[in-house]
Amino acid sequence: MELRKILHSESKSHNEPPLTYDEAVELFNRLDWTDENTFYNQDFGDSYLQLKAMRNDEVFDNKDIKVEILVDENIIKFAVTKVTREEALDLIKYYFEHSEIGDITSYTTEFI
């Protein structure tokens, strides 16, 4: 079974052991997505998936999580979109099963 390194808003350190998919889903569901400081970062391949809770005034159509996927090796360019919690779980699953970036044609690009 695949393991992924995950850092999140309740992490005690950067050295926590990698998680299985089921453990990652349990963690995601346990996090408080109504708190705008909540985040979930999952490494995959040479990139990572970052999920961030959005402020109430940013939520539209139940899309309350901002997705950022690192798309360059300089760590400055990200593919960005907003998703529902169910869609976020689909992304977690996808990036447990794949080490390459999936279809991000509908995402916008942001730079740090």
Image: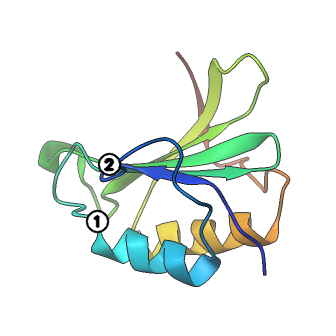
Residue drawn at 27 percent across, 47 percent down: 54
The image quarter containing residue 5 is: bottom right
Residue 71 coordinates in the image, percent (x, y): 74, 33
Q: SS for tag 1?
A: loop
Q: Could you tell me which residue is drawn at 35 percent across and 48 percent down? A: 12
Left or right: where 87 falls relative to 8:
right
Residue occupying the point 29% across, 74% down: 30
Q: CA distance from mark 1 to mark 2?
A: 8 Å
- In the image, residue 64 sits, relative to residue 106, either above or below, namely below
Binning the other alpha carbons within 10 Å of mark 1 as few (below 14), some (14 to 19) or many (20 upward) gives: some
Q: Which mark is residue 31?
A: 1
Q: Which one is earlier in the sequence, the residue at label 1 or at label 2?
A: 2
The answer to whether the residues at label 1 and label 2 have Cβ atoms under 8 Å apart is yes
Amino acid type at circle 1 is Leu
Disc 2 marks which amino acid? Answer: Ser
Residue 34 is left or right of residue 21, and the answer is left
User: Which secondary structure lies at badge 2?
Assistant: loop
* Percent position of residue 78, x then y: 62, 31
Residue 76: % across, % down:
63, 17
What label does residue 107 carry, if any?
A: none
Residue 72 x, y percent position in the rendering: 77, 25
Q: Which residue is mark 2?
A: 9
- Tell me the quarter of the image containing the N terminus: bottom right
